[in-house]
Image (spheres, grey):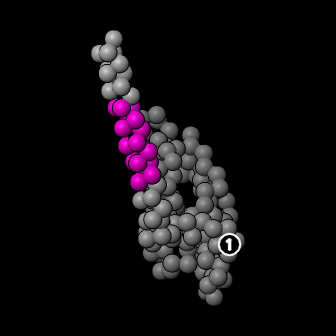
Amino acid sequence: MEEKKNKGSKMMLVLVILMVLLIGLVVGVFAFFFMNMGDDESGSQIVAAITPTQVADLEFFRISHPINTNLLTGPDGARRVSFNFEIGIDGNHPNSSTIMDTLGRAESVVRTIAINVLGEMTAEQILDIGGRAFLTQAILDRLRTEFQTNLIVDIFIIDIMVQ
């Protein structure tokens, strides 16, 4: 009988120790994250990049009609895509209207860049969320290079259909 009492006491002691360690771990993790929140400049920039004020400051250039082009053939055999997008321009910059005019005059260049990026992808890549992120980033990078500007800040997919 006394052996069961000792066994129960030991079990209770182990449970109490485990609970104390678990609570300490949780408190430590929260303290670590809260104390380091302000130190990560890149994290602050990410949060700042999606504030409503900055989205409201964007100007948008939309291509005149969707792009219909071929894809690389993937395992499912899909080979065509219809793609429509807008280009986000930094509307706070004094040269934003100039870049908007330039994009309007050079829409064929914009379309060619998008067609070239799409032509390097399969349907599976485009349908995957990571593939769409790659698609928009690749178009963004190539547009910035072609037009030699960082005023082009984002690519927004309006419609995408794969056949």
Left or right side of 109 for 62: right
Residue 60 in sight here: no
Q: Residue furthest front?
A: 2
> Who's the residue at 36% across and 38% down the image?
17
Q: Is residue 117 above or below residue 94?
A: above
Q: Residue furthest right?
A: 56
Q: Position of residue 135 (x, y in %)?
A: 49, 56
Magenta region's main secondary structure?
helix
Q: Does residue 48 show up magenta in the picture? A: no
Q: Does residue 14 show up magenta in the picture? A: yes
Residue indicated by mark 1:
53
> Who's the residue at 60% across and 80% down the image?
99
Q: Residue furthest left?
A: 3
Q: Position of residue 153 (x, y in %)?
A: 55, 71
Picture quarter with the N terminus: top left
Highlighted magenta segment, given as a residue range: 13-28
Which secondary structure lies at badge 1?
Answer: helix
Disc 1 residue type (three-letter): Thr
